[in-house]
Structures are given as C-alpha cells and as structure tokens.
Image (cartoon, rainbow, N blue to C red):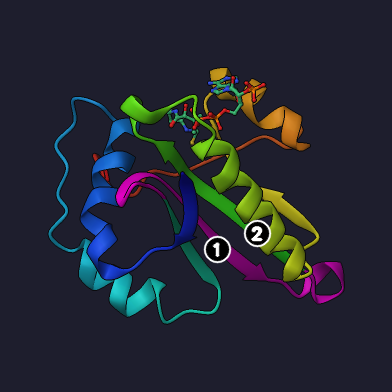
Amino acid sequence: MIEVREAESDDIEAACRIVGQLSPGQPHDYRDAVEKFERHIRPSPDYYLWVAVEDGVVIGTAMMHLQHKLSYRCGTAAHLEDVVVDASARGRGAGRMLVQTAIDTARRHGCYKIMLTCFEKTTRYYEPFGFERHDIGMRMTLKEALYA
Ligand SMILES: CC(C)(COP(=O)(O)OP(=O)(O)OC[C@H]1O[C@@H](n2cnc3c(N)ncnc32)[C@H](O)[C@@H]1OP(=O)(O)O)[C@@H](O)C(=O)NCCC(=O)NCCS
C-alpha cells in the first residue's frame, strides 16, 4: 500500500535520488540536503516536503511552499515543485496521491491558487486535477548546473 506523509531527515537521500531523475545524466550532490531540510524546510510552517512510501520504501516526492502576499487581499499562493515518482514505481498512483495531498493542503491553508511549472509533455498529467495553462514563465539563471 502506498502512503503519503511529510518527509523526515532519514527520507532525504532517497527523495534527492528520485528528484535527480528530473535531470538524468547530470551529477547530483546530496551532501547538503539533510542540513538544508533541517534548517530551512522542516521548521518552516510554509514549506512542505512529502514522500510517497510503499512497503517502507520511498518511491516519490513532492515539495510545496506557501507565498504570503500583500496583493489579492493578502492572499496566499502555493507553489508546487519537484513532483517525481521513481521510474520503477510509476503508474501505481503515487503521483496522484502526492498532487492531491498538495491540493488538499493548499485548500486547508486557504490558498487562492497553486502554481507549478512543468514540461510540455506533463501538462496532460496535471490537467485532470484542474490545472490550466496560465501566464508565461520567465527565469534568470543565476548559477549553472544546479541539479538535485
Ligand atoms: C508525472 C509523474 C509524477 C506521475 O506519477 P505516477 O505515480 O506515475 O502517476 P499516477 O500513477 O498517479 O498516474 C495518475 C494518472 O496520470 C496518468 N499519467 C501518468 N503519467 C502521465 C504523463 N506523463 N502524462 C499524462 N498522464 C500521465 C496515469 O495514466 C494515471 O491516469 P489514470 O488514473 O486515468 O490511469 C511521474 O510519471 C514522474 O515522476 N515523471 C517524471 C518527472 C516529472 O515529469 N514530474 C512532473 C513535472 S515536474
């Protein structure tokens, strides 16, 4: 059975290895990840890092952070990132559970929207949840090769 829960420190290396599948062939450095999790992610009421676990094994992960705004009547926007299921465990519902957990959590916080960026080919995955194409993403790269 698959369950989704908030990550603990012991999950971080597995979560990083799975997120690394977003950039196959690139070197991944996990050394700072536990410290980052413990210092910046876990203590924050505005950060969520979930893992999907099957028979005690981490098979997927997703991260969301909440942005408290002054616009939209001081509304809160949720940003969903790094939704990844291990290649060997795809198609068994873990991704759906992770995304639904994020949606439920954002609703619970009263967020007025959830934003994410994804590959063109993944738009079809998100649409059934209710996500729509919106805005144009822009980015300024400040460091090269920042991989999981
Ligand atoms: C996208 C991803 C997270 C889906 O996770 P998953 O656990 O395989 O998905 P699920 O088993 O929950 O699938 C749920 C539904 O979405 C469908 N689906 C899965 N991947 C899909 C895709 N890439 N495009 C369209 N539909 C997809 C499934 O067929 C299923 O539909 P059904 O319930 O009608 O059968 C996973 O394939 C993955 O990690 N891909 C690589 C990383 C990635 O692209 N992440 C998202 C962008 S940041």
Q: Which of the image's four quarters has the C terminus?
A: top left
Q: Residue at x 66, y 21 (%)?
A: 124
Is 52 colored magenta in this rendering?
A: no
Q: Are marks 2 and 1 in contact (CB under 8 Å)?
A: yes
Which mark is drawn over residue 84? none
Image position of 56 with respect to 21: above or below: below
Q: Nearer the viewer, residue 65 or 57?
A: 57
Is 68 colored magenta in this rendering?
A: yes
Label 2: few (<14), some or many (≥20) within 10 Å?
many
Ligand 1 position by quadrant: top right
Q: Which residues are magenta?
A: 53-75
Is 141 left, or right, of 5 in this rendering? left
Label 1: few (<14), some or many (≥20) within 10 Å?
many
Q: Which residue is mark 2?
A: 78
Q: Position of residue 122 (x, y in %)?
A: 56, 24
Is 96 left, or right, of 33 in this rendering? right
| Magenta stretch: helix, strand or loop mostly | strand
| Label 2 beta carbon less than 8 Å to ligand 1 | no
Q: For residue 11, which quarter of the picture? A: bottom left
Q: Nearer the viewer, residue 103 or 28?
A: 103
Q: Which residue is mark 1?
A: 65
* Amino acid type of the residue tagged 1 in the rendering: His
N-term-proximal mark, 2 vs 1: 1
Is 45 left, or right, of 50 in this rendering? right
Q: Residue at x 34, y 47 (%)?
A: 55
Q: Residue at x 65, y 59 (%)?
A: 78
Q: Nearer the viewer, residue 90 or 140?
A: 90
Q: Secondary structure at mark 1?
A: strand
* Amino acid type of the residue tagged 2 in the rendering: Ala
Q: For residue 18, which quarter of the picture? A: top left
